[in-house]
Image (cartoon, rainbow, N blue to C red):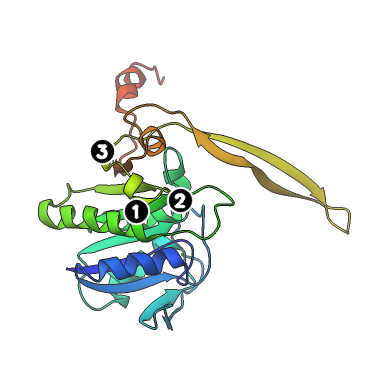
Amino acid sequence: MHILVTNDDGVQAPGLLALVLEMRKLGSVTVLAPDHNWSASGHVKTMDRPLRVRETRLGDGSQALTSDGAPSDCVALALLGVVEHKIDLVVSGINPHANIGHDVTYSGTVTAAMEAVIAGVPGIAVSLDSKPGAGELDYGPAARYAARVVRQVQTRGLAQGVLLNVNVPCIPEPEIKGVRITRQGMRVYRDALDARTDPRGKPYYWIGGEFPTGVEEEGTDFGELQAGWVSVTPLQLDLTATFALAGLKNWTWE
């Protein structure tokens, strides 16, 4: 199996190296990741400028590729031919914070896996549920659980158009209870607008606020993470609100 590893935190992020080390135990690995942080970049396709790809080295001295494009650009570049050999699976991560609920539309980690699915290649996104100020993170448990998920995908396959969003509790590995299959939960954002004035008297803005939380509900990604389980959520790109179709068809358009 040929695995493409990417992320949204930049090619030198420690979470990526931890993931690469585990993926090498399962197959051949190619790395193509952004050359800088693209967190909360969402699903990007760069069309207005050329994209550059260059060689670099990871922290263990191994060779990797990096691009000035977004995470989804990196996946597209690899699948469209920058990487010569056929790619069987794309694994994105390990993000230092959870990607749950509505996060998946913002997350470069998740949308890199989405880009794989668009191209007909299975995609997996992996994140660690750490909190701000947690200090140096141990990505080893998340990487090992990512390997468990990959082994299942190798054995059982994934349905067409489905990607897996994996979130791992940031607790000691012996305290992790296991894996739960979950649905998207409700993320609670506490965004705030910080309006400032530059030295020339012109306004500018930061979007900030407190770190998001969520609604603890059994069976959801947020709820099971809080209970100490690894959350594996199957996602699809079809966002159609099917329950609303019948009602909309009764609207009068004349």
- Residues under labels 2 and 1: Cα distance? 10 Å
Left or right, 242 with respect to 251, comes to: left
Dot 3 or dot 1: first in sequence order is 1
- Residue 199 in sight: yes
Q: Quadrant of the C terminus?
A: top left
Residue found at x 55% / y 39%: 212
How far from the left and from the top, in percent, is residue 117? 27, 54
Residue 45 occupies which quadrant of the picture? bottom left
Q: Of label 3 and label 2, which has the lower sequence position?
A: 2
Query: Residue shown at 53%/69% (left/top)?
Result: 36
Q: Residue furthest front?
A: 174
Residue 116, percent from left and from top? 29, 58
* Identity, as a three-letter code, of the amino acid under mark 1: Ala
Residue found 37% across the figure and 78% down from its top: 64
Residue flagged by tag 3: what amino acid is it?
Ile
Measure the C-alpha gap from mark 3 to mark 1. Answer: 14 Å
**Residue 119 visible here:** no
Q: Residue furthest left?
A: 155
Q: Nearer the viewer, residue 19 or 203?
A: 19
Does 77 sit left or right of 121 as displayed? Answer: right
Question: Quick one: quadrant of the N terminus?
Answer: bottom left
Question: Taking 21 as reference, is 194 above or below it?
Answer: above
| Secondary structure type for disc 2 | loop
